[in-house]
Image: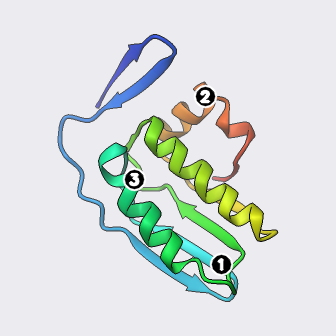
């Protein structure tokens, strides 16, 4: 894994493609997203569609498990912000659970670590 600096944006360059084995689980009022390895322009649309369709009226909170997240770009950051807005609109919370070190570095560089509730 390598890092490249493009002006104000830091990008994680991962030379081997990652396959998302995303799984969405629900429990009482929580939607939990697990198994996401890549949050980039190519994968964000699918993630948003699946989360939106599974985030039924009885659910309020979204937990995103970032323990497998190896690639995160600006589209991925936008997807995390969208999930936070979805939860907030229902009076719930968005939590980022166990993000990887590279993902946490991107969140810190963009100051989004101050916006999200991050559970290590």
Above or below 34: residue 116 = above
Above or below 33: residue 3 = above
Give the spatial CA distance, label 3 vs label 2.
19 Å
How packed mark 2 is, by other alpha carbons closer than 10 Å (few <14, some 14-19, many 20 or more), is: some
Q: Could you say whether the residue bearing mark 1 is in a helix, strand or loop?
A: strand
Above or below 69: residue 28 = below
Residue 97 position by quadrant: bottom right
- Residue drawn at x 65%, y 78% as measured from the top left: 30
Q: Residue lying at the far right in this picture: please name it.
A: 91
Count of numbered labels shown in the rendering: 3
Give the spatial CA distance, label 2 vs label 1.
27 Å
Name the residue tied to disc 1: 30
Q: Indicate which disc, 3 or 1, sits on the residue closer to the N terminus.
A: 1
Q: Residue lying at the far top in this picture: please name it.
A: 7
Name the residue tied to disc 2: 110
- Residue drawn at x 29%, y 48% as measured from the top left: 42
User: Residue 95 in the image: x percent, y percent?
Assistant: 67, 59
In the image shown, does 45 or 37 lie closer to the viewer?
45
User: Residue 40 in the image: x percent, y percent?
Assistant: 37, 44
User: Residue 70 in the image: x percent, y percent?
Assistant: 37, 45
Name the residue tied to disc 3: 44
Q: Indicate which disc, 2 or 1, sits on the residue closer to the N terminus.
A: 1
Q: Could you say whether the residue bearing mark 3 is in a helix, strand or loop?
A: helix
- Relative to 42, is 75 on the left or the right? right
């Amino acid at each position: 894994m390598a890092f490249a600096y493009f002006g104000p944006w830091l990008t994680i360059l991962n030379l081997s493609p990652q396959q998302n084995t995303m799984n969405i689980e629900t429990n009482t009022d929580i939607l939990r997203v697990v198994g996401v390895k890549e949050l980039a322009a190519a994968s964000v649309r699918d993630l948003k569609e699946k989360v939106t369709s599974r985030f039924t009226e009885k659910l309020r909170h979204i937990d995103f498990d970032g323990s497998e997240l190896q690639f995160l770009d600006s589209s991925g950051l936008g997807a995390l912000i969208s999930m936070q807005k979805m939860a907030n609109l229902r009076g719930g919370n968005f939590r980022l659970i166990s993000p990887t070190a590279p993902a946490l570095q991107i969140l810190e560089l963009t100051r989004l670590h101050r916006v999200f509730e991050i559970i290590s």
